[in-house]
Image (cartoon, rainbow, N blue to C red):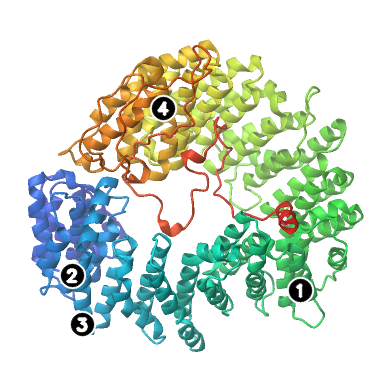
Amino acid sequence: MDTPNMDTVYQAISALYDNPNASEKEKASLWLGDMQKSIHSWKIADDLLQQKKDIHSCYFAAQTMRSKVQHNLSELPSEALISLRDSLVAHLERTSPDTSAAILTQLSLALADLALQMPSWQNCITDLITSFSNKNDYALLEILTVLPQEIDSSNLKLGENRREEVKQELRASVHIVNLFLKGSIVNSQNTHVALKVIKCLTSWIQVRAINMQEIPENDVVGLSLQVLRDHSSINMLHDAACDCICSLLHCLEDNNNCEDVEKLLFESVSALEESYHMAVAHEEEEKAANYARVFTELAESFLSKIVNAAANGSTHFAMRSLELALVCVGHHDYEVAEITFNLWYKLSDEVYQRDYQPLTDAFKPHIERLIEALARHCQCEPDQAQLPDEGEEFFEFRVKVMGLIKDVVFVVGSSFVFRQMFATLHADISWEQTEAALFVMQAVAKNILPEEYEYVPKVVEAILSMPENSHPAVRKTCILLLGELCEWIEQHTEALEPSLGCLITALNDEQLAYAAALSLQNICKACRSHAHVHAGVLLQASRAAARLPLPAAAALARALAAALGPLPPAQLSVAMREAVGIHLATLSELVKCDREPVRGTEWDPVSGLDKLAALFRDVGVESAGAPHPCLPALADAWPVLRDVMHKYAADSRVMERSCRALRFAIRCTGKHASGLLQPLAQTLATLYEARAHSCLLYLGSVLLDELASTPECVPDLIAMLQALMPKAFQLLQQPNGLQDNPDTVDDLFRLCIRFLQRIPLDFLSCGALDAVVECARLASKLDHREANSSVMKFLYDLGSAANNVRGKEEVKKLASEALQRHGEELTYALLEACVLHLHAYMIAEVADAMLELVVYQRREHQDWLQGALRRLPRPPSPRARAAPTPHQAAAFHHAAGRYLCVCPAPAPAPAPAPGLAAGGAAAPAAPALAPRPRRAHAAPGRCVPSRGRQVPVCVSSPSPSPSPSTRTGCRGRCGACRARPRPAPAPRPRRTRPLRSITRPAEQRKAKS
């Protein structure tokens, strides 16, 4: 782009903000976007800020300056950075309290990001305070607020070394900052200044720049507590004070504090209880929520000490914080109660892990009160005609309540809660109270022992005899409760037939259909050995309920499949074909008609596809020798599914569901589906060539997983791979192809992992390996968690194949040859990805792959690591801001040297710099390299595994670990926690870790202890 005229720039900005014509706005936006990307935008933004013609042009210029500093600072020569800094300082000095807050924030962010990326600017905090103090304190407050916040910004990719350097500078400057903040409070009684001062201190606390021992004398902390004590303070100031105190309490967990400081903070926060009650009395809901946050943070900060003291038979002074949290749970607004949920999850984890009955008993009163309060919060409004629908806030709250009750119920016992809720059910309570009690009983029902005979029979009898004129919400919850009692029904088969009859009848009620289908699914899965007697009734219900909504129809199909599974093979084959045929007929009609699919209507093929998937998913039949009884049903389904996929090839949603149905069908029939492999593989290749849906690659990996053990299928599987790969590589080789298609990367390498695990010799010798390894090298820097994980698992398995002395010699030879060709570049690619591109939480799997390469180098007397370290960017390269120092690189190579036969040079003499371990923790100086000890009794030529050793991980990570505010531990994600050998990739879709439920066996164990 040529240098644009300033008049043109002003016209474009005016069109963007003022022109009512949408097309003109779009044109202006595109032109300004291109201009921002050009080198000329630096001068244009500076000129716009100098001229200050109007607010729109100033905001556009400030936003452009921030974006350029954040993303394109490398465009400027290093000598120009000082001029840029002086220009930004000058623009900020000309701001005033009347300046738009957005403009001030953008300019402050630009200056903060520049300071963070400019190591040559030493003592930047002192310089800023000197430059702005007594000139523009308002702008200085904004700069000092955003600068700590930007340290951990993933957009800057600073690297751990630079981040730690800046944090040390902040800690060294905290005294002068505290003096400035104190002066700002004294010199101005303006509420807006007080707000900015509190926010500024909060950002410094969050990066751990404040010394906790100095907190009692900190004037801003005192101001925050004063604001919180006054329930009539303005909301924005109250929110900021709450954030400040919460951040401060969070720091208590991470510091070995003086007990006097802890007691002082605890007493100061505990004294806010009266202010909380005043806020409740004056219906200040936002402030009540703030107090709940503070009390919850207070309890979480002391939780470990509270539990430790209770385990030792004593009471910690902070035990009262749990009472404060329970006071907030009793608030009439469920959103206030929800704030405390994380505290109870953490408490249940602490108590559950210790498995000590006196400790459990110490917290029983708290959990009893918690469950009583949750039961009240789950009550619907009296004028509601039915339960809240999925997606509504109250529905989501009740889901969270159910998860919380399941998590904490072991403390008081499921039977106790069930009896307690049952005792509240009497004739003179309202329907919403009845429904809430039943809802809590539903949460604990699966933990009730099947031998229970006092209360459960009465509950089941009452549900089965419930009149039809009962409130719909009560009926729905009763139906769901019946489904949760499925394990009890399994042991009391006399209740099975009436329960199924009741639920099948409820399918005819639109409001109850999904709940009834879900309960049918639970009961049929739990009572498989008895439910098959009623398969005919369920099949008839499935045929009659063809117009059910999709979720209900899919749940009913899964219930039917579970009931069909135990049938004799001949009967199962006939019944399965009949059940599948119901949905195939509908799909066939859709294929023949010319109407476009409409989501959620009878013209949506996804409905039939999901029902087919449900049938094959839950039938659960093992057939070793004889033909699989579900194979005829798959043979019937395949032609229809093929036609659906061809017709709707452009619809990714339909293709995903079609592949899902085929996936479950192939999983169900296993190797018996080998006869369909050739047409299936050919169809996959044809469809993928036309439309590169990544789900087709995943389906290919399922085929491989099930059929690779059949030798006659191997040639067709290899041919399928060779047919799919050209299109996949073509897609990924496009500009930004890897970044734009992470699903393809994920599924492609899942497919390759399956090949490497199931038929490694055929895969390694098919001629595709070099292209796959080169693609893995390029994808190693892809900052996408799932895709990068699959790439690293593939590289790990490839290295394992080369290092496996017990494997086939041909496989080992081919894998070794591949590593000889690509190992050096792979080593550098993994190292570069760790240092420059990936988040810290992604490093563990890269380290596993790197370790296999290091082990291979040791065996082959190679040292690719040394060359990779030398190739890392060095100053003045702009990419070097996240690179390790020479001392770190040498120390890392020295630590890794024990895995290598080639001895590295001695470690450097100067004091050790922070190590390259994840998170940048300081590492001790590397010891002098000693000869690798020989393992006693090792067989000649046998590879001695090194997996028990501490693996040096090279990370000068460009972005921080997940925020400590998540308040969770490793949860088994780190390299040290993962067991080997590595399992096969988990089936899609990946799910986040669910909330832990306390199972009945664990509860029994706790009762016996």
* Visible residue check, residue 545: no
Can you identify the residue that label 1 sits on? 471
Q: Quadrant of residue 46?
A: bottom left
Q: Is residue 228 left or right of residue 182?
A: right
User: Are there few (<14), some (14-19), or many (20+) residues within 10 Å of tag 3?
Assistant: few
- Residue contact between numbered discs 1 and 3, judged by CB atoms under 8 Å: no
Q: CA distance from mark 3 to mark 4?
A: 65 Å
Label 4 vs label 1: CA separation? 59 Å
Residue, disc 2: 139
Amino acid bearing label 2: Ala
Which of the two labelled residues, at mark 3 and mark 2, occupies the earlier sequence position? 2
Q: Nearer the viewer, residue 588 or 641?
A: 641
In this figure, which residue is indicated by the disc labeled 3? Answer: 186
Q: Residue 917, position in %: x, y?
A: 35, 40
Q: Are marks 3 and 4 in contact (CB under 8 Å)?
A: no
> Gap in Å between the C-alphas at discs 1 and 3?
62 Å
x then y, percent, for residue 694: 50, 35
Is any part of residue 696 visible from this angle? yes
Q: Nearer the viewer, mark 1 or mark 3?
A: 3
